[in-house]
Amino acid sequence: MKKIKIPSELVYFVAIILLALAVAILTSANFGISMIVAPAYLLSLKIGVITFGQAEYIIQSGLFILLCIVLRKFRFVYLMSFGTCLIYGVVLDLWRKLPCFDPTVTVPGSMVLWQRILMFVIGVLLTAFSVALFFKTYLYPQVYDFFVKAVSLKYKIKLSVLKTIVDLSCLTASIIMTFCFFGKFVGVSWGTVVMALFNGTIIGFFSNTLDKFFEFQPLFKKFSEFFKLEK
């Protein structure tokens, strides 16, 4: 079957928009947000004067430093992943201005149970799908996923396996933060554990499915050469 060709640059922006939407949905459902974004969410709640998106800048700055240490090198182009983080943070805060996602209008977890369950399922699938999209473009995803992409390539670790390891590490950090900040579970719940255990597998499923039907090609081939990762 002939594959449908899609520009990588378009996939990049679609992935950002969908990932930010997924995070807004999961936060509103309040069954536990993704372990990846939980540290930033908890930090924004604790400080109070910064938004969810702005807290991402702080957390991902630290992760970017760790990435360079693990890779044992720094390339200026790596900063593209932090640029993605900046765009994502803005889009996330814009989604959270909608009444259904704005915590000052609709308190997280205040909707009826069936709506919350539906939102949680959609949020989990949308998160995995958007991350899979990020892996199909040469433009770097935000630092969380760029970390997985770069480290898996350098050390020849299966992508879905490393993603699960990183997710579980973030889950551990989130549990420590919620008890240090609030003395109880806030933003982290059974849904967070579900995503930590299965997110990598679902991403792998979406990634393989996308490869069967689509071919992702850059519109600017010479420009894309700058973003090639070294093994």
Image (spheres, rainbow, N blue to C red):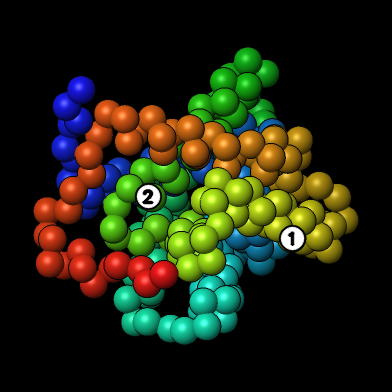
Quarter holding the N terminus is: top left
Whether residue 114 is situated above or below residue 13 in the rendered picture: above
Q: Quadrant of the C terminus?
A: bottom left
**Picture layout, residue 133 above or below residue 49:** above
Outermost residue toward the right in this view: 183
C-alpha distance separating marks 1 and 2: 24 Å
The amino acid pointed to by label 2 is Phe
Query: Image check: 145 left or right of 222?
Result: right
In the image, residue 66 above or below residue 2:
below
Would residue 196 be visible to someone looking at this image?
A: yes
> In percent of the image, x 42 and y 43: which residue is there?
132
Residue at screen point 63% across, 15% down:
114
Q: Answer few, some or many: residues within 10 Å of disc 2's Cα (few below 14, many 20 plus, some between 14 and 19).
A: many
Give the amino acid at mark 1. Answer: Ala
Q: Would you say 229 lies left or right of 102 here?
A: left
Q: Nearer the viewer, residue 100 or 114?
A: 114
Q: Is residue 174 visible?
A: no
Q: Which mark is residue 12?
A: none
Quadrant in the rendering for residue 95: top left
Which label sits on residue 173?
Answer: 1
Badge 1 density bin: few <14, some 14–19, many ≥20, Cα 10 Å: some
Dot placed on the residue nearer the N-terminal end, 1 or 2: 2
Which residue is the site of mark 2?
134
Image position, residue 210 (x, y; %): 34, 33
Foreground of the two, 200 or 22? 200
The image shows residue 22 at horizontal and vertical percentages of: 48, 39
Report the front residue among 160 and 78.
160
Query: Measured from the top left, where is residue 111 in percent x and y?
Result: 62, 24
Instruction: Please name the residue shown 32% across and 36% down the image.
Output: 211
